[in-house]
Each structure stands twice: as C-alpha cells, then as structure tokens.
Image: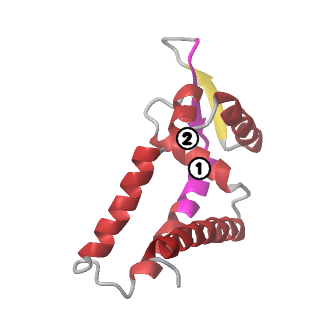
Amino acid sequence: MDTPKQVINELLVEVFNHILSIEAEALRNRGVKLSMNEVHVLEAIVKTEEPTMTHLARRMRVTVGTLTTAMNRLVEKGYCTRYREEEDKRKVLIALTEKAVEALAVHEEFHEEMIDSVIKDMNLDQDEVLLQSLKNISTYFKNKY
C-alpha cells in the first residue's frame, strides 16, 4: 500500500507532465509553433520589469548562455527583438513582437480553459483545505527554487 507521501509525489509528477504535454499539443493545434521552453521565455519577458538577458536568466533560473540560445531562436522566429537602451547603450533589452503577444494570448486562453475545466465541479469557497494545500505547494517551490 502506498503511503500518502508516495501518492502525493506520483500525483504531482503525473499532473506536471500531463499539463506540459497537453499544453504543448494545444498550442500546436492553435498554430503556435514554439516549444514550451520558448513560451516560458516569452512569459518571463512580460513578467520582468527590466527584461535584460541577466534579469531574464535570473528569473528563469538558467544561465545567460542557455537563455541566449533560446533568445536567438525567438528572434529568428520573429517573436522577440533586441534593442539598446537610450540612456545606457551597454544595456540590451528584449521586447516582444505582435506575434509573441498573440502566442501568449493563446497560451493564456489554454490556461483559462484548463482551470475552468478543473474547477467546474468544485466549490472552492468551501474547500479551504485544497486551496491551502495548493498555496503550500506553490510556496515550497518558490522558496526552494
């Protein structure tokens, strides 16, 4: 018999893997020709106040070299541009193109549909234990990584 700890581990791994593969397929079916890693880079650009390579790499917890490889592909595919800041020409900032904004809208739509589907039969106002558990999981990953 599996312990609760083993069950939770299996569920987290299974859910994570399913979300990534379903998300990648859904985006492909909707015309987005990007890997999930590339989509996550686009998300990081949106969420980073000053989207320089250093800030983006730090946010994504990767090296600047790893990010450079992904960024080169995104620029080549027409999803991002690089530009120098007027006040400090040494600083190279990253901007999204309209194509990237459209891809992120499709990505956001997928997430909305997924969450709506997951919670449709739940009464979240009364399920405080579930919500607190999900918050605890999120907090753990934020603090740990």
Residue 8: x %, y % from top left:
48, 72
In the image, residue 83 sits, relative to residue 44, either above or below, namely: above
Percent across and percent down for residue 18 are: 62, 72
Rendered residue at 59%/55% (across/down)? 102
Q: Depth check: 79 or 15 in front?
A: 15
Which stretch appears magenta? Answer: 90-107
The secondary structure type at the circle numbered 2 is helix
| In the foreground, 100 or 144 | 144
Going by the numbered disc 1, the residue's amino acid type is His
Please tell me which of labels 2 and 1 falls first in the chain: 1
- Residue 81 falls within the magenta-colored stretch: no
Examine the structure image and report whether residue 99 is included in the region drawn in magenta: yes
Amino acid beneath label 2:
Met
Q: What distance separates the C-alpha of mark 2 from that of mark 1?
A: 8 Å
Q: Residues within 10 Å of mark 2 (few under 14, many from 20)?
A: some
Mark 1 surroundings within 10 Å by alpha-carbon count, few (fewer than 14), some (14 through 19), many (20 or more): some
Are the residues tagged 2 and 1 within 8 Å (C-beta)?
yes
Could you say which quadrant of the image residue 36 lies in? Answer: bottom right
Residue located at (34% from left, 67% from top): 133
For label 2, the residue is: 60
Residue 50: percent from left, percent from top: 47, 29
Position of residue 84 in the picture relative to residue 133 (left or right): right
Q: On screen, 48 above or below 121?
A: above
Q: Which mark is residue 40?
A: 1
